[in-house]
Image (spheres, rainbow, N blue to C red):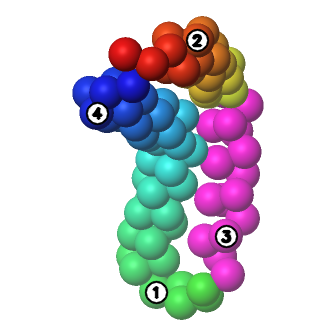
Amino acid sequence: MTQDTILDLIRDGLLAVIMSSAPPLLTGLAVGLLVSIFQTVTSIQEPTLAFIPKIVAVLLSLVLFGPFILTTLTTYFAKLISAIPQLLVPR
């Protein structure tokens, strides 16, 4: 196993994590920003007001992007498992 192989596996793993976590995180960020703007405009300073819309939006994004996230992770793990025999062979 060479350093290039290890770096490729790490890069692919990080890319899979970023691709699978981006939709819920970006949705939560967008909804949080919109709620903050709404609170600023209306002068409502209730800190718990932002939680419910963010939770609902993140859950909806998980339902909507669930197949994409599952496909991304299973593709990475299938690639990783299929590469095990080549990784164990000494060179």
Q: Is residue 24 left or right of residue 13?
A: right
> Residue 54 magenta-drawn?
yes
The 10 Å Cα crowd at callout 2, few under 14, some 14 to 19, many 20 or more, is few
| Secondary structure that dominates the magenta span | helix
Q: Position of residue 50 (x, y in %)?
A: 60, 71
Give whichever of discs 4 and 2 has the lower sequence position: 4
Label 4 to label 2: alpha-carbon separation: 17 Å
Give whichever of discs 4 and 3 has the lower sequence position: 4
Residue that carries the numbered disc 2 in the rendered image: 85
Label 4 to label 3: alpha-carbon separation: 44 Å
Element class at badge 4: helix
Give whichever of discs 3 and 1 has the lower sequence position: 1
Give whichever of discs 3 and 2 has the lower sequence position: 3
Dot 3 and dot 1 residues touching (CB under 8 Å)? no
Label 3 to label 1: alpha-carbon separation: 17 Å
- Per the rendering, the mark at residue 51 is 3
Inspect the image, locate mark 2, and give the three-letter code of the amino acid beneath it: Pro
Of marks 4 and 3, the one in the foreground: 4
The 10 Å Cα crowd at callout 1, few under 14, some 14 to 19, many 20 or more, is few
- Per the rendering, the mark at residue 43 is 1
Q: Position of residue 34 (x, y in %)?
A: 44, 60
The quadrant in which the C terminus is found is top left
The residue at 68%/36% (across/down) is: 62
User: Which is more toward the observer, 72 or 89?
Assistant: 89
Residue that carries the numbered disc 4 in the rendered image: 3
- Magenta residues span 48-64
Query: Can you say whether 38 is above or below 4 in the image?
Result: below
Query: Can you say whether 24 is above or below 13 in the image?
Result: below
Residue 12 visible in rendering: no
